[in-house]
Image: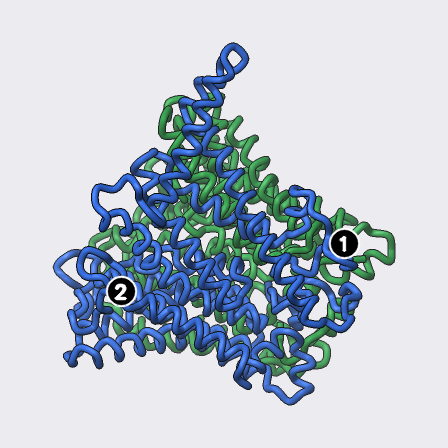
Amino acid sequence: MSQPGTTPPAQPPVDEAAPGVPAADRPQDRRPTGDGVLREMLASSWLMTVCAIVLALLIGAVLIAAADPDVQRTAGYLFARPSDFFTALWQTVSGAYASLFQGAVFDWAASSPQRAIRPLTETLTISVPLILAGLGVGIGFRAGLFNIGAQGQITLGAILASWIGFTWDLPAGAHLLLAMVGAAVGGAVWASIAGVLKARTGAHEVIVTIMLNNIAVFLVLYLLTTSVFRSATPQVGRPVAETAMLPGLLGDAFRLHLGFPLALLAAVGVWWLMERSTLGFRFRAVGSNPHAARTAGISVPWVTVLVMAVAGALAGLAGGAQLLGTERNLTGAIAGSIGFDALTVALLGRSKPLGTVLAGLLFGAFAAGGRLMQTRTGTPIDIVLVLQSLIVLFIAAPPLVRAVFRLPAPGARRRSTVEAAA
Amino acid sequence: MSLATPATAAAPAPDAAVTARPSYRAPIAYAVVALVALLAMPLRTPEGDTRFRLSTDTDFAQIPTFAVPARPVVWVLVLLAVALAALAFLRTRAGRRTGMWLPVVFGVALLLAFLTFAGAGRSAVIPLTSVATGTLFLATPLIFGALSGVVCERVGIVNIAIEGQLLAGAFIAAVVGSLTASAYMGLVAAPVAGALVGLLLVFFAVRYQVNQIIVGVVLNVLVVGLTSFLFSTVLSEDPGTWNQRQALPVLPIPVLSQIPVIGPILFRQTLLVYLMYVIVIALQVYLFRSRWGLRLRAVGEHPKAADTVGIDVNRTRVRNTLLGSAVAGLGGAFFTVASGLAFGKEMTGGRGFIALAAMILGRWSPKGAVAAALLFGFADNLRTVLGTIGSSVPPQLLLMTPYIVTILAVAGFAGRVRAPAAEGIPYVK
């Protein structure tokens, strides 16, 4: 990691300005980019996203089929009776994907209308921390920082939210507000360690955040043994007071809570910050070209610290939403795999707020649907990880997807690298 | 390393040590650690002895259990650490570089002090030999992973996918070992799995110039997903065929294994560990003393210059990344056939990331990586040791230390740490 002299090309994706390509080798697409060109690119990137998802689902289908005993058995006499094989193939794959959809959006086989729409609310619930943390990771990407530490920042957010949630005694609204602010501060402080070290000593943020993730794991395990956090159940923290919980939106039958509108609000906030505010402009300027940004009078170290703090605050909020919205008790596994999923969410959403929200919803749907798929068809939920990672890989390499679907390369653009890694 | 002194890919930063003022960060770090040890340990060591055992029951030459007076020994070891910190200051002021021995002696002194402190006045005996054996055992996958990182990063490819390579190696070793009913076949197959993950890494990173950190992170998720999926389906349906555990036999080396103390530690191991010795030595020599190593490092430091003298940069990168990934894959065999276990979901448990840390702490050199991996293995092993002697130190806090040490190291508190200059930057002619 630690690139000596972080050069823009070594940095992760920043906006649409040819990330991953050394400046000297950037395609000659510096011609005036009018609105038309921009729209065209956006359109093609949407097409790419859809193609990548389709391709990933196809590969997933091959895996599901290959691992299915019925398919394996009928493949044994494929040439004697091919129809058996194709029937088994179709039933396995369509069964798995249908239950994935039923578990994520609408369950037409459910006994009551309430149960039928419950999957959609589950998807929304699961997507809350993914969206919040994904927004944070996305801000880092656009400012040229690779923040792998969402996992640790989520954990710290959850620790602080839970501590405020069960020690303080406050009226309902204030308690929740304070707990969420605490979560944001916890994540921000944790991320700032990486930001300050990067700014002051040049320690690469990837390594520092990976290490901070691991430290956070042991920190929460240690805290759970202390008298402050310990509850009657070992390895489970004390429950948060009712006044600090995020209220449910649809009554007790559903888990959907106030965190979802808050996540959408955060996305709007991030959009305003990145697109409309001076600070966001500085973030993007440093991400696009730190040398130019410094020449223009922007303090690069200061921006580095601020970016990490904002990213950490959003990840901390994700931890807070997870704890105050659904979990209620602090555990060692409070962050689950949200932090790493948030990375892929931000990549899939191309680090833009709207994209991140949609990607968060998609991954929330995968997670919610995967559970039903596992119980109904026995297809393990792990396939969801495969789908997620394949989608991101394909999105990162548009030429590959274009080659598979025989799509023409866009315009006069040379090579692939423009959207690569975006 | 520094954001304040950016350099382009074509012109790596000039060697900072030549021009810059001597940095006091490392001596300060030693001093702080020594001071913390001075405050934490000697005065709080209870009266009494700490008992150590050096030999195992099966040794040829038995060394009796011996006891040392805890408090004086802790004092001596901690004061030695303080003296080393002072020496680091003096050497820095004189403008001389401290060698590799100083941090190693410093670390070993404090570790021994800690063991003496933890065992003081207790009836339990600290089995030093098994502490060392356990350390080497737990460090094995870290060493393989860190060596993989050294090869890949020296050639300019960031390999975050070590975790995935270890896991893929563990998976394939278990499956092939089970199918062929031979642990050795598993050992042969493991590097192939690692190399396949490496192939995906270079396919996206070199061919499509996707950001290498992104590819690495995503590949880790992909391997976790694939192996867990196959584990839950194929392997769980018929574990007798697909996931029967196979164990590599321990092969004591005839004469060497009879040496007291170090014999049982170093020479009563499985073939995987002997392979590790060979790979460590071979890499240390060839990386810095051969034409292959010179080219590899040239590509990682200054690809344009390497290209100018006729080295095919991308081909060198692809080949050596595959080689490095194969080393990590071989290390994955540790989790299954070398430990005599069947495959389990996500059984590498983040060791790949610790290996990454070991590589950085070891300053991108094989021998440094081994030292760092042993340190991390020791910290991991402490959990068991402290449990045995019934110490009251919270294990979670000790388990954090390797990560904190790594952060201090990358922040420049453990001497100069510099990554290969062209690391992570795709080469486009």
Where does residue B40 sit, x and y in percent of width and height?
Answer: 31, 73
Please say if the residues under marks 2 and 1 sit with CB atoms less than 8 Å apart: no
* Label disc, if present, on residue A245 of the rendered structure: none
Which residue is drawn at the image coordinates 50% and 41% (left, top)? Answer: A57
Q: How many marks?
A: 2
- Disc 2 crowd, CA 10 A, few/some/many (<14, 14-19, 20+): many
Give the residue number, with chain letter if any, for mark 2. A257
Up the image or down, A58 lies above or below B73; here it is: above
The answer to whether residue B110 of the structure is visible from this angle is no
- Image quadrant holding the C terminus of chain B, namely bottom right
- Which residue is disc 1 drawn over? B294
| Apparent side of residue A352 relative to residue A177 in the rendered image (left or right) | right
* Residues indicated by labels 2 and 1 sit on the same polypeptide chain: no
Percent position (x, y) of residue B307? 83, 56
Instruction: Decide which of A382, B411 is in the foreground and name it.
Output: A382
Residue kind at label 1, given as amino acid type:
Leu
The residue that appears at 48% across and 42% down in the rendered structure is B167
Give the residue furthest to the front.
A113
Distance from disc 2 to disc 1, alpha carbons, whole Å, reads 59 Å
**Chain that bears disc 1:** B
Q: Which chain is blue in the rendering? A: A
Q: In which quadrant is the N terminus of chain B drawn?
A: bottom right
Q: Nearer the viewer, residue A269 or B326?
A: A269
Using residue A398 as the reference point, say whether residue A113 is left or right of it.
left
Q: Is residue B338 above or below residue B73?
A: above
Q: Position of residue B6 (x, y in %)?
A: 68, 76
Residue at the right extreme, as displayed: B309
Q: Residue at x 32, y 65 (%)?
A: A219
Point out the frontmost of discs 2 and 1.
Answer: 2
State which chain is coloured green.
Answer: B
Residue nearest the viewer, comparing B11 with A135: A135
